Amino acid sequence: MKSAWAAGAGERRSAQADLGGALAGNLAALMLREKHLAVAVGLAPAGLVGLIFVVIPLAISLYVSLWEWPLLRPGREFLGLGNYARLLQTPDFWRALRVTLLYAAGVVGLGTPLALLLALALHQVRRGQALYRTAIFLPVAITTVVAAIFWRWLYQPYAGPLALLWQVLGWRPIAWLNDVALPALILMALWKQTGYYVLVYLAGLTALPAEVHEAARLDGAGWLAETWYVTLPLLRPITAFVLITGSIFALESFGPVYVLTGGGPAGATTTLVLYLYERAFAFSELGYAAALGWALFVLLIPLIWLQFRLWGRAEVAA
C-alpha cells in the first residue's frame, strides 16, 4: 500500500514538473513575441517614413525613366531602356559627368587637407580658440543662395573686390565666371564647407588618447614626427568620413552652381544635378531626367556602401 502511494506521489511530482516546464516555455514564447512586437512597433514610424520618402519615390522614378514623359504636355510613350541608351550616347551627359567629377575632386582633394591643417593649427592654439572656430564655421551657417550671391559680387570682372585687388597688384584682370568658372566654383565651395570639416577634425583630435602622445614625446618625437606617425594614423576614420561625405555632397551639388554660373559658360560648369534639372523643367523631358537621376544614384552607390561599412566598423569598435 505504501509503495503504491509512493509511486503515485512520484507520478504527481513528474506531472507537476512537466506542467511547470510547459508553463515556463509558454511564458518565454509569450515574452519573445511581446519583444518582437515592441521592436516592430518601435520601428514602424521609421519604416513608414522610409517607405513614403525613399522606396515609393525610387519606384516611381524607375517607372518614369522607362517612358518618354513630357512634363507639361499630355501623352507619353513607353521606351523601355531607351532613355538610358540615349543618355550613354549624349555628349552633354558625358560633359556633365566630367564636370561633376572634376568639381568633386577639386572640392574634396583640396578641402580635406585644408581642413586637416586648419584643425591641427587650431588644436595648438590656447587662447581665442572659440573665436577662431566661430570665424571658420561662420560660412557654413550662411545659406547657400546668400553665399553664392556674395561670391558673385566678389567675382565681378571690373568692379568686384578681387578685380580691384588684381589691379592693385598690377595683374591682368580675370573674368572669373567665364575664364576660370569651375575653379571659381571650387574656391567658393572650399570657403563654404571647410569649416564644417575643421570642426569634425577638431572633435577627433580632442578624443585622441593623451597617453599615446605622451609616450611619443617621451621617446623624443617632435611635433612633426608625432603628427605624422601618431596623430594622422589615429585620425584615419575621421579622414574616411570626411572624404566620403564630402564626395557625396560635391556630387549632389546644385544650389551654388545654379546661382553662381547657371551652368555656364557654354556648359563648362553644368553638373549632373543641374543637367537633370534642365532636362526636367526647362526641356520638359521627365523620363530622360529620371534616367539621369538613376545614373547619379549608381555613381553614389559605392560611396554610400563605404559610408555604411565605416559606420558598421565604428559601432563594432564601440
Image (tube, rainbow, N blue to C red):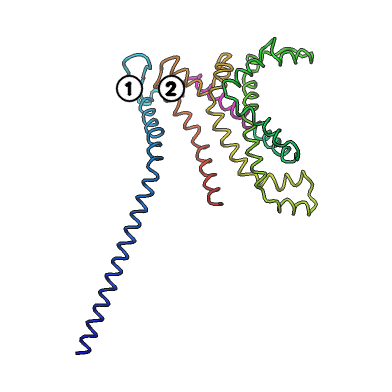
Quarter occupied by residue 206? top right
Q: Which residue is mark 2?
A: 289
Instruction: In the rendered view, tell whether residue 164 sits above or below residue 124.
Output: above
Quarter occupied by residue 184? top right
List the single residue furthest toward the top: 158
Q: What kind of residue is marked 2?
A: Ala
Q: In the rendered view, does 232 fall on the left or right side of 74?
A: right
* First reached walking from the N terminus: tag 1 or tag 2: 1
Q: Residue drawn 69% across and 36% down?
A: 130
Q: Residue drawn 56% across and 25% down?
A: 100
Image coords of residue 108 (percent x, y)? 62, 32
Q: Residue drawn 51% across and 42% down?
A: 308
Kindly state the secondary structure of the residue where label 2 is placed: helix
| Magenta stretch: helix, strand or loop mostly | helix
Q: Which residue is mark 1?
A: 78
Q: Residue drawn 65% across and 18% down?
A: 180
Instruction: In the rendered view, tell whether residue 34 sits above or below residue 199.
Output: below
Quadrant in which the N terminus appears: bottom left
Looking at the rendering, the stretch of residues picked out in magenta corresponds to 85-110
